Structure formats: C-alpha cells, structure tokens
Image (cartoon, rainbow, N blue to C red):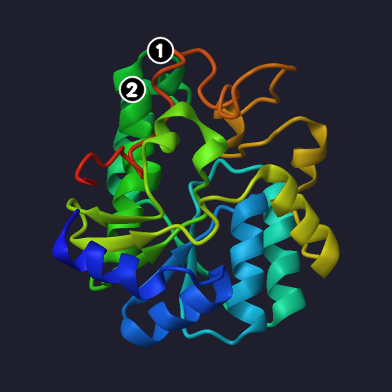
Amino acid sequence: MSTQAEEIKQLTAGLDPVAALTKLAEHFSGEIVFSSSFGWEDQVITHMIFTNNLPIKVFTLETGRIFPETYYVWNRTMEMYGNVIHAYYPKNEPLEKMLNEKGPSSFYESVENRKECCGIRKVEPLNRALAGNKCWITGIRAEQSVNRHDMHNVEWDEAHNLVKFHPIFDWTLDQVKEYIKKYNVPYNTLHDRGFPSIGCQPCTRAIREGEDFRAGRWWWEDQSKKECGLHELIIDNK
C-alpha cells in the first residue's frame, strides 16, 4: 500500500462512514469527489454527504444510455436534498466516430468493442471528473463480486494518482437496504425488479436467483470480465 493510502487508512481507522467522510473532507479540502451512478450504495453515500453538508463534490457519468428510472432517481435526489450533482458527458467526436463506423450496438460484437464504448462513454469522462483531485469516494462493497473481495476500503489508484475510499465497503446489502428504509432515501425501482447492479440500459439485465451480483452486467461476456475500466482491481494493497 502506498504511503498516502496508509496514512488515510490510519486516519479513518475505527470511524463510521460519516465520521470518516468528514475527516477526509477536511484532509482533502477542495480536492475530494464522490462518483454516483444512483444505485443503492451510491444513494446511501449521497444522503450522508448532503444531509451532513460535507464539502465533497458529487458527480455522475451521463453515458447517454441510462435507464429512465435512473433519470428519475437523479432528478428526485436533486429535489430532495437541494444540491447539485455534476454531470460529465462523453466527448462528441470519438462517440460520433464510433457510432458512424460501427453502429449503436457494436458493444455486443466483442469485448474489445464493448471496452471501446465504455472507454468513450465512461472512462474518459471519469478521467476529467477526477482530474485535479486527491481523493475519490465510491460506493463499492466487498460482497458485490469475487474481484471486489480482493480490494480494501482504502486504496491507492495509480492511474489517477489519488486515494480511493469506500466508506461502506464492509456493509452487507441488508444494511444498505435498512439505511435506505430508515432515512427514506430515494432509490432506483429497478432494484425491486431484480437489478442489483444498474448501468447502461443495453448492457444491464435483471439477474436470476443464485446468480452473481454483477451477472446482469454485460451478461453476454465471460463472467470473469465484469469491470468496465472504472474500478480496475488494484493489487498494490499489501
């Protein structure tokens, strides 16, 4: 683990999520952001940030392919808390080039094409959103996938040169649901219809009983390739 990540691990050790976020907002004043895709976990953290007036910038990646239900939660969240959620869109030129050359559904044809689409619609906008910041807050939980069990609640992101912190990393899904119910947090109704992980509409389906949490994401691909490039497994944790 990097020196900076180790420092943050010690700074947040033993703190509950709100206390940890408060510490980090002070430590990284003006250089800390939270990325939301409006899923269960992200809505919990958004509630923590907004209700405690924490100076953490909340942003989302508007890929142009998200569900109507996701737009509703986005709008409802802004109405409920009266705060700004900053949107980052893909750049026009590479998106238009991909669509003109390969059509609107090229991501179904190969892993390479799917990664190209994710790169244009998500990874590049994320890079802009994170630029100039020193701490990235996420809603990742350990039980979401086998890969994420190998992660830690504090990590060093070499690609973006910043610390990543997952405040509810050790929470169970039941804890997340209980929090949402207790505080009447707006959430995506697709969760009630078998969508535990929600991304772009063409690339997300409901999962069947017994399937992995992320089985509904890019379901036509090998089950071991379930990340889009936003949260590559970080191995420098020991």
Residue at 24% of width from left, 56% of height from top? 156
Measured from the top left, where is residue 116 in percent x and y? Answer: 31, 31
Kindly state the secondary structure of the residue where label 1 is placed: loop
Q: Characterize the local packing of mark 2: few (<14), some (14-19) or many (20 or more) Cα atoms within 10 angstroms.
A: some
Residue at 54% of width from left, 17% of height from top? 219
Q: Is residue 23 visible?
A: yes
Please tell me the numbered disc located at residue 109.
Answer: 1
Instruction: Spot the residue most to the front.
Output: 14
- Tag 1: amino acid: Glu
Q: Is residue 38 visible?
A: no
In the image, 37: left or right of 146?
right
In the image, 185: left or right of 204?
right
Residue at 60% of width from left, 24% of height from top? 216
In the image, 187: left or right of 238?
right
Is the Cβ of the residue at disc 1 closer than 8 Å to that at disc 2? yes
Measured from the top left, where is residue 38 in percent x and y? Answer: 62, 55
Measured from the top left, where is residue 133 in percent x and y? Answer: 27, 72
Task: Say which residue label 2 marks.
Answer: 113
- Name above or below for residue 71 compared with residue 148: below
In the image, 123: left or right of 187?
left
Kindly state the secondary structure of the residue where label 2 is placed: helix
Q: Nearer the viewer, residue 34 or 117?
A: 34
State the CA–CA distance, disc 1 to disc 2: 7 Å
Measured from the top left, where is residue 226 in percent x and y? Answer: 44, 26
Q: Nearer the viewer, residue 40 or 92?
A: 40
Residue at 60% of width from left, 29% of height from top? 213
- Tag 2: amino acid: Asn
Please tell me the numbered disc located at residue 63.
Answer: none
